[in-house]
Structure formats: C-alpha cells, structure tokens
Image (tube, grey):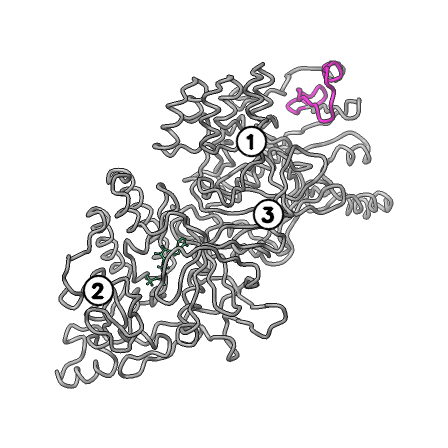
Amino acid sequence: MSNQDALGINWYHGKLTREDAERILLAEQHQEDGLFLVRQSNTSAGDYGLSVLYQGEVVHYQIRRHGEDAFFSVECCKRVLMALNAPIRPRTQDNETPAELARQAGHLEVERLLKQHQEDGLFLVRQSNTSAGDYGLSVLYQGEVVHYQIRRHGEDAFFSVGYTPLHYACQSNLPSTVRILITAGGANVQLRNTKTGRVPLHEAASGGHKDVVLVLMALNAPIRPRTQDNETPAELARQAGHLEVERLLTGVGPPRNPVTNHHLDDTTFLTRPQIEPGPPRVARGDFYFIDDGPYLDSLEHVIDHYIACPDGLPTTLQVPVPPLPKPPLPELPPSLFNRGDFYFIDDGPYLDSLEHVIDHYIACPDGLPTTLQVPVPPLPKPPLPELPPSLFNRGFSTTLPNRKKTPRVHLIGDRLGSPNRIDLNGGSSLRPDFGSSPRPDLNGNSPLRPGLNRDPDFNGNSPLRSGLNRDPELIDTSATLPLPGKFRAAQRRLKGSPSELGIPEMLPPCPALPPTPVDDIIPEENIILKDILGEGEFGSVYRGILQSKEGFETDVAVKTLRKEYMSSNKNDFLREAKLMMGLRHHCIVKLINISMGSTLLMVQELVPLGSMLTYIKQNPDKVDPNYEFKLWASQIALGMQYLEDQKFVHRDLAARNILLASRHQAKISDFGLSRAVNSERNYYKATHGGRWPIKWYAPESYNFGRFSSASDVWSFGITLWEMYSFGQQPYGEMKGSDI
Ligand SMILES: Nc1ncnc2c1ncn2[C@@H]1O[C@H](COP(=O)(O)OP(=O)(O)OP(=O)(O)O)[C@@H](O)[C@H]1O
C-alpha cells in the first residue's frame, strides 16, 4: 500500500481497530450503504480488514493476501453477504461455487437460496439485432433484464488520462482559446479526465466561467455529462454558488439527437430505455438518452465506464457474463486492453497480461466502485471471432487473431411476408449468387456488368451513360485489354508464353466472396427518402431517415439502383453492398444495410459534407493544404491500409470518391469496382475491361488488368495531386486513351 497516494487510494486507514472503524463509519453525517474503509487486519498480519456500512450496521470482511493475488474471506452470515451484493458464484481453486459446496455438504436450503439469487449488475454484450454494426447491452436489475443499445459511430474519439488543454482553458476562463481549440484545433469537448470523469464543461461550470460555458454550449458540448461522482455541470455550478451559470445550464432544452449531430458522429454512446429512478432523461422514441452520452471511443470503454459508474443505469455493471462457449483467454483480441506492450483499463496501472489485469481488479477496485467479483465460466466455443473486425480495431491494430477476412453480415429479406428474400449465400433465382463469378465472354462482356462493355467510345461516352457521364476520364478498356481470347491469340501470334513476353499469365477469376451471414435487411417502409445528395452512375443517392423497429431515427444516405438497371446491375450493386458490409473503419463509409423492396437500396452512414473533390473546388479558401489536406490524406491512407489488410483492392480511389464527414474526417467510398485480391499472388486480375478511370490507374492496371494495393497506391498519388491542385483534372484535357 506504499503507493496508495499515487493510486489515489483514500480508503486505507492503516492500523485501526474494528471498533474504531465502526465509530468512523457510523459518525459520517450522511450515512449510506456501501460506505467503507480498509484497515490492517488485527488478527492476521499482512492481511486487511474491510468495513462496510449497510443499513446502519457495519459489517467486517477480511481481505487476505495470497502471494500477488488477494481474495476475500468474509465473516458474516450468508443472507448478509447476499444482501451486501457479495458475489454469489465465486469459484475456489477447485472451481467450486458456494452453491456447489452447499450441495456437497447437504445444505440444500442454502444451495437453493444461492441458486435463486440473481445479482444486479450481471451483464453481457451482444450484437444488435436491430442495427447492424451496433451492440446490445443487457443488464440484470432487480430480477429484470434491461436492454440498452450501444451505438458505434466511427473511432475518432480517444481517451486522455489527465486534463487536456481544453480543460485548462476552461479552468482559466479563456473563452476565445476554448473556441479556437475546438474549432481550429479539433479539441474534443467530451474528453474526460479519467480520474475525475470531468469534461471541460464541468471545469467551466464549477469555476463559474459563464462565457466559456456559452462557447461550449454554442459548440454543442453535451450539457449533462456526469463526473465519476455523478455530478452534472449544473450541479457543480450550484455547489460553487454560480447560480447564473446553473440557470444557464438547466435552462437548455433536451439534448439534441446525437445520431443526427454532425460533430458527435465519431463517437460511441449508450441509449437506454427509461428506468426509474434515475437522472433526468429525454425521450427519443422508445429510447432515452441520458446526458447526451457519455461518448466513449470503444465498446470496451463504454463497458469500463459503466463498470466504474452507474451514470444513469440503476446499477453499475458488475458481473460480466461471458458467452456460453469457453473463450480461451489467449485468443482474445490483443487490442482489447492492449496499448503497446502493456495491458490496462482506462488509466489504471499498466500490467503485463490480461490475467494480471483481471487479478488486479479482482484484488483491488482501484478506482472502480467495486471489485470484479464473479467470473462466470463460459460454456461453449467463443463467438468472439464473429465480432465485427472493427470492434477492437483502432486502425493501428491491423490484425486480429482468427479474424475472418470476409464480411460477416447476413442479409435476409423479410418484407411483410413477401417472398422477396435475398440470401447472400446464394441459392434461388431470387437469391443472387455471390458465390459465382460469371466468366466474361470472349469479347469481355460479363453477365455481371453487361452495360459496362457496350462499346463506349474512347472519350468514355457510353450509350448507358449519356447525360450521366460525370467522369469523362473513365474509358472503356474492353477493346484494349488483353482479354482471355485475345490474350491467347496474341500469344499464338507472338509465339511465346505470356511470361516470356513480359505479360503476366492470366489467372483464373478471383474467388468470389465467401458466403456471408447477414442480419435482417431493412424493410422499405422504414426508410424515408428526402433530398438528392448526388447522382451515381446507376441511381441517385438520397439523404434519408432510417427508422428502427423501436422508432429510433437516424439520418442516413441511401444509394438507389434505378429500375431500368435492376436486371443488369443488381448483382454488382449487391456485390458492392456485401463487400462494404464487411468493412468497419472510421475512414471508410459504413454500410448500415440494404433494403430490397420495390427497388434496391443501400443504406449508408450519412457523410454530411459530400464529395471531397466538390468541397475543395467550392471552398478553396476554407481548406488549408497544411492542415486539412494532410489530415485527409492521412485518413485516406489509413482507410486504404485497412482495405489492404482486408485483402481488397479499391480500384476507384479518386478525390471524387472521398467523402467528408466534417472538415476533420475524410472517408473512402464507392466500392463498386473493389475486389478481393488473390491471396497467393496478392493482386486481382481483371479478366475483362470495363469503364475504367484510366487517369487514376497504374500502368500495370491498364496494360495488364492487374490490380494490387500497389496500384491503389498509384491512385492515391493521383488523388493527392487532385487535392493539392485544388481539384484540377489530372493530365489536364488529355483523353484517357492518350494517357
Ligand atoms: N454516404 C454518403 N453520404 C453523403 N453523400 C453521399 C454518400 N454516398 C454518396 N453520396 C453523394 O452521392 C454522390 C454519388 O455517390 P457514389 O459516388 O457512391 O455513386 P456511384 O454510383 O458510386 O457513382 P460513380 O460510380 O459514378 O462514381 C457522391 O458524389 C456524393 O456526393
């Protein structure tokens, strides 16, 4: 305990008798259950005593040291233990629970008691059934299971350990600095000091700095975040006598919908149904937001937060219920708690293995309101590998053990009993078969992209694109590419093998994407289309609203497939959706799901500022090559690196296909040409031409149809050129064919 100060321990009293402990606890003015202190054990040298106040009485426990581990040895009767939320299912070294021991000893009443008792705070996390990519949190409270939704919105936020510059500026009453830090510096208004849980608004409110509070509110800082001690900014202002600031903070209306709020897009937050009693909350359909957050940067952080502090829940999360299968610890994603070489939770002590972390928090709350108590052993095999890859992926962690590289969402159409079902695993005529890869004919005409090979001229003007051709640099290469038939003919003519001639061998078509499990597709009636955001090649992209089954509304972008292209381009459309379904990265536009009603719809996250190319051209004065361009370039690179890790090539990376979520976040979109790469050769071989953006293509791509991450890098270079030339056409007026 010598480092108790460093760890912020304020409950350790050293040598103290049991009677003194009782006197101290009972003398506290506001006596409440759970008041506790720790002291040296009087009866067992080296051990500790834990004294807890419960319903006006002090109950004593003994904390016994056992090497580096510690465990509780408690001296009180079973009912008191249970009333005090003592863990019900701890296991001995021999893996026995108290209930099992009671049964073995013939104490059947005690066994029944223990089995009946279910603990508040028992919890588990699961995939959301209603919102692909999100999660559900189910918590046991007073015999009932309460369900919450954990929404994921990008991975931008991050945790800081202490105060940030924004905290300091708020403490020092510097409103203009606060504004600059947020608007120009991108400071996150929700970063918490992880010891106190304070966000910048808490600092401004407790200091009574009205102007800073106004700036924060104007910049959409959430109004009711809670500290570790459960205090809102308004409460802190009141405590400090700053009544005007308190009025300011309590006079505001309900927090805005975080889902539709742009600056809060890249966060994770918890929505919850109303539970009484609890702090103020505001209805959103069937869900209630409390305090606009907290907004945390990962699922682990969300869970850590609610383990540490109820923050509106009826109870802290206390007992994690592992999935039925037994998850072998070494197979847990390394990034779960991994930051570099160490394992830690929040800003807790750095420990060198997951077991040590768990041991540590079993042994010592260390900032948590309670120790980790009841490890529930898992039963069958772990569903962990089925978690979306981005669950624990922060961009810098590029691989997960045992992670399947393929998409893992399964779409099943179920539209009011209609037979119109789509199963991406293939099957019926109504189930387009993703598993097949139709071979092009000798002219390069593929059943998958029929319209794309219909004799466009070299200016890229195709009968299909008349009036729609937004990219004159796209040229059809079916006439120029060495197609299978032409390739063999050329080979015969030249009397040499392709490799002798320096031409890569034609490869069999890249294996199709493996079958994918897909959630329910979105019923058409749950999508409301609003205004048009842009025109795609085969349909418009709309701003829309997605309604969940619970009535929860989310702003989305909806990519449509025009009816006239339904037969010719349905498979391409679905292929793009399937590929996107498996991608989860904050620098890649997220596909929420598809809808198969009267037409095919692809529901994507709304990326509010639209195409980067248009933005740069329209707002040259707003973008700083030394700031925005560098930031966007690094984000594009990050997204492309992720794509490479997933073994995909994009094949259409260009400024027009980068969308801007904000001036601080670029996202890669348009995966219509993307393909899986051959895992052995590390490239994708196009077996037929198509409408290709030649100006963005590497020589090996337009000469030999060879696409790899390296050729994507070439396109990245052209994209950078577009950015730094403020949106000019690469190669000026030159035609694609001349390039
Ligand atoms: N998720 C989104 N959020 C906001 N706007 C979007 C989104 N997706 C697309 N858009 C807008 O719609 C336009 C066309 O979309 P997109 O490029 O995906 O269509 P497309 O059919 O793939 O086009 P093409 O293949 O011709 O490049 C974009 O330039 C952009 O302005």
Q: Is residue 481 above or below residue 276?
A: below
What residue does disc 2 label?
A: 694
Q: Report whether the residue tagged 1 is closer than 8 Å to ligand 1.
A: no
- Disc 1 residue type? Pro
Q: CA distance from mark 2 to mark 3?
A: 45 Å
For image coordinates 60% across by 17% down, the residue present is 239
Name the residue tied to disc 1.
225
* Crowd band around label 3 with a 10 angstrom C-alpha radius: few (<14), some (14–19), many (20+): many
Mark before the other along the chain sequence, 1 or 3: 3
Tell me where the magenta segment starts and ends, as one range: 23-48
For the C terminus, give its image quadrant: bottom left
Residue 497 magenta: no
User: Distance of mark 1 from mark 2, alpha carbons?
Assistant: 51 Å
Coordinates of residue 275 in the picture (x, y in percent): 70, 40
Dot 1 falls on a residue whose secondary structure is loop
Q: CA distance from mark 1 to mark 3?
A: 18 Å
Q: Secondary structure at mark 3?
A: strand
Horizontal arrangement in the rendering, residue 302 relative to residue 502 (left or right): right
The amino acid beneath tag 2 is Ile
Q: Determine the secondary structure under disc 2.
A: helix
Q: Which mark is residue 149?
A: 3
Residue 682, picture quadrant? bottom left
Residue drawn at the location 60% of the way across and 26% of the way down: 231
Between 124 and 245, the one nearer to me in the picture: 245
The amino acid at mark 3 is Gln
